[in-house]
Amino acid sequence: MTLLRGTDRAAFATAFGVRLREHGVAAGQTAVEDFVRALAACPPRTRSRLYWTARTTLVRRQGELAAFDAVFRAVFEDTELDMGERGQDGPRLPPAQGFGADVGVSGRADGGGLPWATPPRVSAPADEPGPVTVPQRLPSGLAGLPEAPFEDLDARELALLGQWLRTALADWPTRRGRRLVADHTGHRVAVRPTIARARRTGWEAVTLVRVRPARRPRRIVLLCDVSGSMRAQATAYLHLMRVLATGAPGAGAEAFAFATTVTRLTPVLAQRSPEEAVARATDQVADRFGGTRIAASLRALLASHHADSTRGAVVVIASDGWDSAPPAELVAVLARLRRRAHRLVWLNPRAGASGYVPSAASMAAALPYCDDFLPAGTFRSLADAIAVIGRHR
């Protein structure tokens, strides 16, 4: 049975908003209008439903909850809100103590100010009610994790953020394909479809069928540094590699890990389970947490049969830039790689620090060959880097 059957909802909402404003709740005209629409969309069949409908539309600040609960208790005498209707087990609001109780609410015995007759005030003052406890909507455990450094995260949080990282892959870099697709904004007229359509109009080409080159996903090649200086970032970067390696079907993304040698991880990262994929990738890298030979690893990649995967691709190197070889060797191999790749992106976990300058000689030598130099010290920065990579069209 609806509580407000036969009651003017607009008048009730207006009077209730006035009562709330008298006691410090900023229930403006917009909130009152939202309350009226909510009553029409969700008829208050119980007092609990009416409470939550009013609270979600009329209360905009957490500091106003106490005043709102006091006004609601004063209006609805002997009300117990059933929290079970929201699917939660929680405490019930204590019954109202009347308009004369010490709850900060006053009113008339005849219910003036509201479009119905409310119960009269009690003859004797009652004790002050205890604090009202209602379930609060709090942020999930994932809310602050993307901003935390990698070394502050455990294995469970890394796996959770690895799954969240997939949501950042909204776009994928594309390239111009050889096929043509119909598009009214195209600059080229397709002769055969235009003639075929002209058969309907007496062989007059009234409608021109325009086409444009199709866009195909561009390959992404990710090379992740798993040396000793990247110990804190290695597992997080493996999750990044899995997201990119399984991102766009048909893109042919490739993932490699390097320290002193380069290891291809694309097959093992394609596992359905993220935990299993990261575990297999960790076991396959034999030189993990060893020395760093960036130039030698890139040279070995370009000398292997996987070198063609870098041609026309977006090559992403995730490393802090520490290399045991002279900077001249890294410059030579990056110049060769830059001529093959479409774009070269460098992710550095230390680039997000305030006042960062590339102190490593190899990192300073590599900057002129990088199209993008991005920080990658948190999962939030990794998500931003994925967004930048996806805009390379």
Image: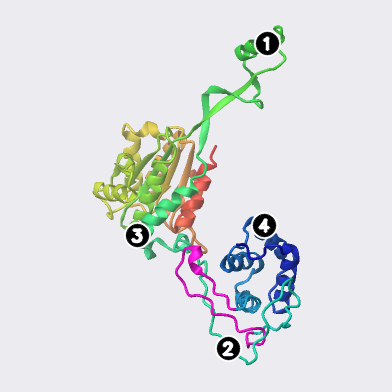
User: How far apart are labels 2 and 1 at the CA level?
Assistant: 85 Å
In the rendered structure, the answer to whether residue 228 lies left or right of residue 14 reads left
List the single residue furthest toward the top.
202
The three-letter amino acid code for the residue at tag 2 is Glu
Question: Magenta stretch containing residue 86, yes or no?
Answer: yes
Instruction: Please tell me which residue lies in front, 179 or 134.
Output: 134
Residue bearing mark 2: 128
Between label 2 and label 1, give the one nearer the viewer: 2
Q: Residue at x 67, y 85 (%)?
A: 121
What type is the residue that disc 4 sits on?
Ala
Residue mark closest to the camera, 4 vs 2: 4
- Magenta stretch: includes residue 81: yes
List x then y, in percent, for residue 334.
42, 41
The amino acid type of the residue labelled 3 equals Arg
Which class describes the residues within 10 Å of circle 1: few (<14), some (14-19), or many (20+)? few
Q: Position of residue 202 (x, y in %)?
A: 71, 7
The reply, left or right, for residue 151 in relation to residue 184 is left
Precedes in sequence: disc 3 or disc 1? 3
Quick one: label 2 or label 3, which is nearer the N terminus?
A: 2
Circle 2 residues within 10 Å: few <14, some 14–19, many ≥20: few
User: Where, quadrant-wise, is the N terminus in this rendering?
Assistant: bottom right
Mark 3 / mark 4, whichever is N-terminal: 4
Residue occupied by mark 3: 156
The image position of residue 220, as x and y in percent, is 43, 39
Magenta span: predominant SS is loop
- Residue range corresponding to the magenta coloring: 78-103
Cα distance between the residues tagged 1 and 4: 53 Å
